[in-house]
Image: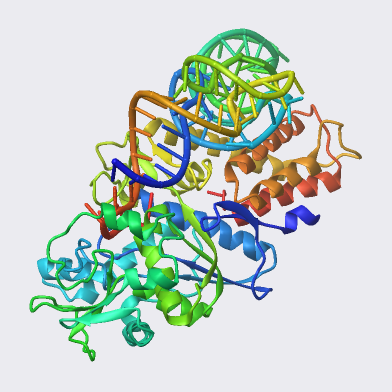
Amino acid sequence: MNASSNSLFIYNTLSRKKEKFEALHAPFVGLYVCGPTVYGDPHLGHSRPAITFDILFRYLKYLGYKVRYVRNITDVGHLENDEDQGDDKIGKKARLDQLEPMEVAQYYTNRYHFFINKLNVQDPSIEPHASGHILEQQHLVQEILDNGFAYESQGSVYFDVPKYNTQHPYGILSGRNVEDMQANTRSLAGQDEKRSPLDFALWKKASPEHIMRWPSKWSDGFPGWHLECSVMSRKYLGAEFDIHGGGMDLQFPHHECEIAQNTASKGHSAVRYWMHNNMITINGQKMGKSLGNFITLEQMFSGDHPLLAQAYNPSTIRFFILQAHYRSTLDFSNEALQAAEKGFKRLMAAWTTLKKIVPAAQSSDEVKVAEISQRCFDAIADDLNTPILISELFDAVRVVNSLADGKMQIAASDLETLRKLFRSEEHTSELQS
RNA sequence: GGUCAGUUGGCCGAGCGGUUAGGCAGAGGUCUGCAAAACCUCGUACAGCAGUUCGAAUCUGCUACUGACCUCCA
């Protein structure tokens, strides 16, 4: 391995530039990724961050870092809408189905694990639940109150965005400013408790029918959604850590609020590198809960959905996702999935062939294995450029097939390099079916 | 309306100032008998207009269109 194979450049949403990754406390790396809200089955869109950050997790470990990967489960606090008075997603589901909220959360957590694991995604190091950190969340609310960046109103506590903004810029991650937002914010119903429509809930008093509730000095209630990630990342990764990932749709308001909460309590943000994966689209539109245009992973695997021409293997889906760069949108279509399926099969066939190749005394001139290998590592190091990496692998496929045809010869050392390359792809990209 | 992305060959999808990305489909070929499979070879595309430059898909400006966020969403 030479120098470039030991580095990593990451596109940091905060600076809008690719930056060389430097661990804060090498050899340790802290990685936090926003996980699912467990009130429904995981769909194709959920697989993107899971796979993207799985690649990152594996590559960091390959580089020799000891990575603590924290991915949370949101099982409380996530409201139906952001008027900060809607129903809790889990609680609503529980009431409708006459279940304990934790039954709902457990059921969908299990389902999430089952389907995401099929995509060959490694488990995170820690998977904390928001409901298991209510006390810590209350402490953070109190800290922010003590520092004067929040106020209590009728049993609820809100973050004071305009006040915060006088000392720290609010909107640095998503490129917004408070003046513009104030001019453009829609007036939502039922916001009389808030001083400004930009303020967000840190603690909400529970209405009588709200079944998920905890006692606090302010009221019987529940924590605001944005709180959990600030609290759990701090608890498990420290007040400052390396990488925070998540979907682009979480950039605002979720991650922006997280930064504000951290800064309001500790005086500084916690995260060094912010990474955001783009969305999977369907007919050019974001696949998501709100539009109801999603296809669950279960349906993808079974083919049981009107839009699916067939069932797709988990490995096909993983390959399909990795054929696009994580920061680009990726459009779902049967044609694209079928193309991925065939390409992936060809790649795997070459790997099978490669295992049977017998080495010769020396390599033919065309067998430039070291160069291909180097380009693969350069690609992954360049902000996880998996599409380039895959295109290099297809160059390797051509070499492998020529070797099998006896058109080229390969020396033992080159053969080992080639096998290692496919094997490390197996480890970093898990292309093996 | 505000902010930010994007528009690449039949389809998907990289590239971000000069060199063939890659995959799928398609065409041609090889495999001592046909077909299939497999493998090999081939494609000169970058929304439009103007500009900068010796040179632009890549930089600048304008126009058109699409999308994301601004409300829950990975």
Q: Is residue A115 visible?
A: no
| Residue at 64% from the left image edge and 65% from the top image edge | A61
User: Observer-nearest residue: A36 or A154?
Assistant: A154
User: Observer-nearest residue: A1 or B50?
Assistant: B50
List x then y, in percent, for residue A292. 23, 47
In the image, is A281 to the left or to the right of A364? left
Work out which residue is located at the far bottom of the displayed protein and give it: A217
| Residue at 64% from the left image edge and 50% from the top image edge | A380
Q: Disc count in the image? A: 0
Instruction: Please tell me whether residue B21 is drawn above or below residue A68 in the rendered image.
Output: above
Instruction: Please tell me whether residue A80 is drawn above or below residue A260 in the rendered image.
Output: above
Work out which residue is located at the far right of the displayed protein and give it: A361
| Residue at 35% from the left image edge and 51% from the top image edge | A297
In the image, is A146 to the left or to the right of A433? left
Q: Is residue A91 visible?
A: yes
Q: Quadrant of the N terminus of chain A?
A: bottom right
In the image, is A71 to the left or to the right of A419? left
Instruction: Please tell me whether residue A156 is drawn above or below residue A403 in the rendered image.
Output: below
In the image, is A349 to the left or to the right of A188? right
User: Observer-nearest residue: A366 or B71?
Assistant: B71
Instruction: Please tell me whether residue A420 is drawn above or below residue A367 in the rendered image.
Output: below
List x then y, in percent, for residue A365. 87, 31
User: Observer-nearest residue: A184 or A223?
Assistant: A184
**Colour mapping used in the image:** rainbow
Work out which residue is located at the far left of the displayed protein and give it: A208
List x then y, in percent, for residue A152. 23, 82
Q: Quadrant of residue A317?
A: top left
List x then y, in percent, for residue A283. 32, 34
Q: Quadrant of residue A345?
A: top right
Q: Quadrant of residue A141?
A: bottom left
